């Protein structure tokens, strides 16, 4: 039975941090890249501060995803997806994990920050 009370959904708007790493997986391909989002806030002294957060993104082609050839460092994107933990064993035999956003929608935004229609 599906639990209708839970929700794992993320919506981010930011800039791509480096050119995506694109890998072929069977008949599909996946693009992995990071995006930066920033928040501006006032500290206790009233000074403006900027905090940047980096997010790991995994986007599979054919799932409402823009053409990967248009993705490159600095491009503003909008990402909708879900958070997932990825666990793996390093080459040294250590168990490791990281969090990534599995994109279900990815679109390039124009300079004004609006999504193209």
Image: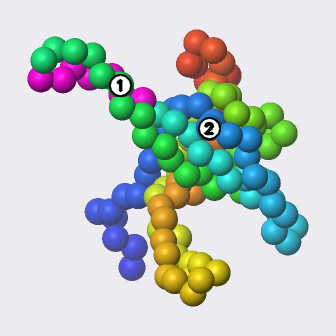
- Name the residue beneath numbered marker 2: 17
Is the residue marked by circle 2 packed among few (<14), some (14-19), or many (20+) residues within 10 Å?
Answer: some
Residue 65 seen in the figure: yes
Task: Quadrant for residue 105, please give it.
Answer: top right
Residue in the image at 66% along x and 28% along y: 74
Q: Is residue 41 magenta?
A: yes
Instruction: Return the residue found at the far right.
Output: 27
SS at mark 2 in the image: loop
Most foreground residue, 30 or 61: 30
Instruction: Return the residue found at the far front.
Output: 92
Residue in the image at 66% along x and 18% along y: 110
Q: Position of residue 17 (x, y in %)?
A: 62, 37
Position of 53 relative to 95 (above/below): above
SS at mark 1 in the image: strand
Most foreground residue, 35 or 96: 96
Looking at marks 1 and 2 on the same chain, the residue that comes earlier in the sequence is marked by 2
Residue in the image at 52% along x and 36% along y: 36
Task: Quadrant for residue 42, please give it.
Answer: top left
> Is residue 48 rendered to the left or right of residue 103?
left
Q: Position of residue 47 (x, y in %)?
A: 22, 15
Q: Position of residue 117 (x, y in %)?
A: 67, 22
Judged by its main secondary structure, the magenta piece is strand
- Name the residue beneath numbered marker 1: 50
Residue 107 seen in the figure: no
> Is residue 57 rendered to the left or right of residue 28?
left
Q: Are marks 1 and 2 in contact (CB under 8 Å)?
A: no
Is the residue marked by circle 1 packed among few (<14), some (14-19), or many (20+) residues within 10 Å?
Answer: few
Q: Which residues are magenta?
A: 38-44
Q: Is residue 73 magenta?
A: no
């Amino acid at each position: 039975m599906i639990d209708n009370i839970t929700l794992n959904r993320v919506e981010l708007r930011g800039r791509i941090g480096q050119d995506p790493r694109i890998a072929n997986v069977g008949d599909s391909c996946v693009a992995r890249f990071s995006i930066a989002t920033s928040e501006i806030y006032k500290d206790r002294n009233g000074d403006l501060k900027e905090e940047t957060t980096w997010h790991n993104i995994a986007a599979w082609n054919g799932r409402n995803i823009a053409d990967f050839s248009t993705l490159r460092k600095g491009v503003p994107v909008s990402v909708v997806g879900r958070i997932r933990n990825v666990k793996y064993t390093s080459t040294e035999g250590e168990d490791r994990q990281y969090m990534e956003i599995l994109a279900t929608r990815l679109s390039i935004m124009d300079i004004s920050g609006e999504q193209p229609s």
